[in-house]
Amino acid sequence: MFAQLTYAALLARVTNDPAVVGLVLKGSHAHDGMATEHADHDVYVVVAEDTKGTGDTEDTGGAGSGPGALADLHGHRSAELDVLVTTVDGFRSLPGYEDYALSRARVVIDRLDGGIAAIVAAKGRRDRHEAATAAADWLDAYANSLYRSLKNTRDGQPLAARLDATDSLGFLLELLFALDRRPRPYNKYLEWELARFPLPGWETGPLLAAIGRIAGTGDTGAQRSLFARVEAVAREAGLGAVLDAWGEDLALMRPPLS
């Protein structure tokens, strides 16, 4: 490993290596305006399947196999640069927790006539059936944590109530992005994502304000008001049965009747 390897030096090296078919930059440097002085460059170096010397590598982080010729690059980590080397198939089959990062990644090199860019684009769009199934599961998880939060408030357990309220927000975000067939952004990029790619049917400002209030205070009124909006959206999306399974417990989650 080369502790002082820079992104510019890496780019120069892989640009001149015929084994490399793609270079993809993810993370803060791929999100306009998000990189700080502390941000490193997170990159995938993608090599052809038939690269001579390709073999198994350890600690791939899901990156599959890396070529022997570039073994010194794979797994490189420094304050300036993190590098993973993978084949095209390995890049295509990276685990789901990478989907958001890759969906907003910057394709720096693509020697497959748009093939690398197509893989990146696919990471940002869920299969319709997969998204619908996931949305049902996330809706149930959201309702469960919301119910626990409100019940704990009712029963005089404020810390438990706030913790459950916070948990519910993670499930809620998974739900809302699944309904739009998109991967949920990491918390760091939530505001960035919604400012540029709003969720259909939601006003970004009020949504973020409600999430911030609930995360900060566990406010029961804010939780119920948000649930009322979510319930309408969920039923419109055909997920009413998930909510109906909660029966009379829905009364605790909904705003009180005026």
Image: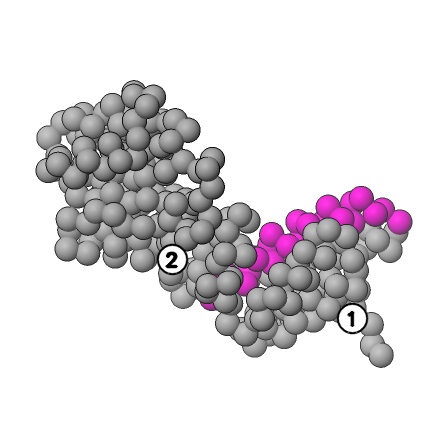
Residue at the (53%, 54%) spot, across then down: 190
Give yes or no for residue 163 being in the magenta stretch.
yes
Q: CA distance from mark 1 to mark 2?
A: 35 Å
Horizontal side of 240 relative to 5 (left or right) equals right
Where does residue 137 sit, x and y in percent of width and height?
56, 57
**Left or right for 161, reference 133:** right
Residue designated by label 1: 255
**Residue pointed to by mark 2:** 124
Q: Which residues are magenta?
A: 156-180
Q: Residue at x 69, y 66 (%)?
A: 226
Residue 253 seen in this snapshot: no
Q: Secondary structure at mark 2?
A: loop
Q: Is residue 79 above or below residue 22?
A: above
Q: Residue furthest front?
A: 37
Q: Where is residue 81? Give x, y as percent.
A: 35, 32
Q: In the image, residue 48 lies at what x, y percent?
A: 15, 40
Which quarter of the figure has residue 249?
Answer: bottom right
* Rendered-image quadrant of the C terminus: bottom right
